[in-house]
Image (cartoon, helix red, strand yellow):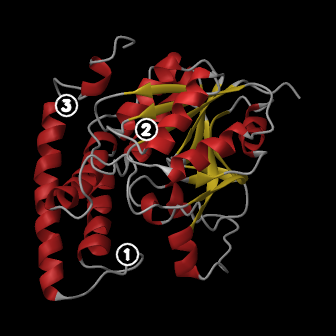
Amino acid sequence: MNLPSISVVIPTYRREAALRDTIADVLKQDYSEFETIVVDQTPTHEPETETYLKELSESEKIQWYRVDWASLPGARNYAVRRSSGDVIVFIDDDVKLEPNYLQTHARNYVDRPEIGAVAGRVFDRMKLADSGGALKIQQLPPEAMDPGIAWYYIDLVHTVEPQQVLSARGCNMSFRREVFEKFGLQFDERYRGSAVREESDFCLRFRKTGFQIWYDPEASLIHLGEETGGCHDISTKSVQYQITFYHNHFFMGLHNLTVGQCLRFFAKLFDCHVLGHPPCNKSGSPIKILVRLGFYSMGFLKALKTWIQSLWDDGQIYSRQDEFY
């Protein structure tokens, strides 16, 4: 089997032991040709991590780039411009991998020219705990391919059968190189905070390439979901984070969906995240609903402003700072 070369991209921000373990798992991969690119947004590491990264970089086991900003989509773009693989695999900095992980991604691209991206299964500790680990989905429902409401039906944690999907999860996804070079796609750097929905936005724009996103449950990893760190530039407990959460959802809709799809998406967002109905299952306290409504409203206004500004500004502020841009 003539397998493609792979670039593994690991954006990181304020992670220590989890980052070291993630890199160690990548370097143990049973794969002939791959490179590991770490885009490090951490201002100051613990001595153990600093030494570990420095030694791996000096021995050319990894490419280690340090930047003075924090943006998950910005870090992805930064790495793509420095990558050389035929396939680019994106993972988080707090995952656990089996030695055949890269091979499971790569084999999907061999003799399958219609596949331009692979979405891998994510063993998410929190979601598995909520379901008791017993839930198994064979085929996702038709709603999971509807851009207006798919985000509440795509389950890449419990689905066990390979199939075409609308979007991948950012902690476990790969793309053919030509998606970036031939079609000029980039991750949108206007997604801030936890950058929630940045990969959804990318996958919606990916549809214009004519390629499929293929879900392979065997291309799996364990997502630890560390409570601290990650590519966040805003504290998860802050008001700004909550507003940005809604901003990202609204902007994804305004940026990619038709008017009808937007209305259904925004209604579902309200029902789930404001009123707290399933699958969000949030508190039904009137006070908490009012607070969430405030965040929802402010997030919409902020997204509307971003969308209007997009008429003359693409928002790629980190990429524009890069000499490789």
Cα gap from disc 3 to disc 1, whole angstroms: 30 Å
Q: Give the label, 3 or 1, closer to the camera.
A: 1
Q: Amino acid at mark 1?
A: Cys
What residue is disc 2 on?
202
In the shown orientation, is residue 205 left or right of residue 69?
Answer: right
Mark found first going from the N terminus, 2 or 1 = 2
Q: Indicate the quadrant where residue 296 lies.
A: bottom left
Mark found first going from the N terminus, 3 or 1 = 1
- Mark 3 surroundings within 10 Å by alpha-carbon count, few (fewer than 14), some (14 through 19), many (20 or more): few
In the shown orientation, is residue 235 left or right of residue 3?
Answer: left
Marker disc for residue 310: 3
Q: Nearer the viewer, residue 81 or 235?
A: 235
What residue is disc 1 on?
280
| Helix, strand or loop status at disc 3 | loop
In the shown orientation, is residue 234 left or right of residue 228?
Answer: left
Q: Nearer the viewer, residue 208 or 200?
A: 200
Is disc 2 in contact with disc 1, using a CB cutoff of under 8 Å?
no
> x, y percentage for residue 314?
24, 26
Return the residue found at the far top: 323
Image quadrant containing the N terminus: top right
> x, y percentage for residue 317?
24, 26
Cα gap from disc 3 to disc 2, whole angstroms: 16 Å
Residue under the image location 32 percent in, 49 percent down: 232
| Helix, strand or loop status at disc 2 | helix
| Helix, strand or loop status at disc 1 | loop
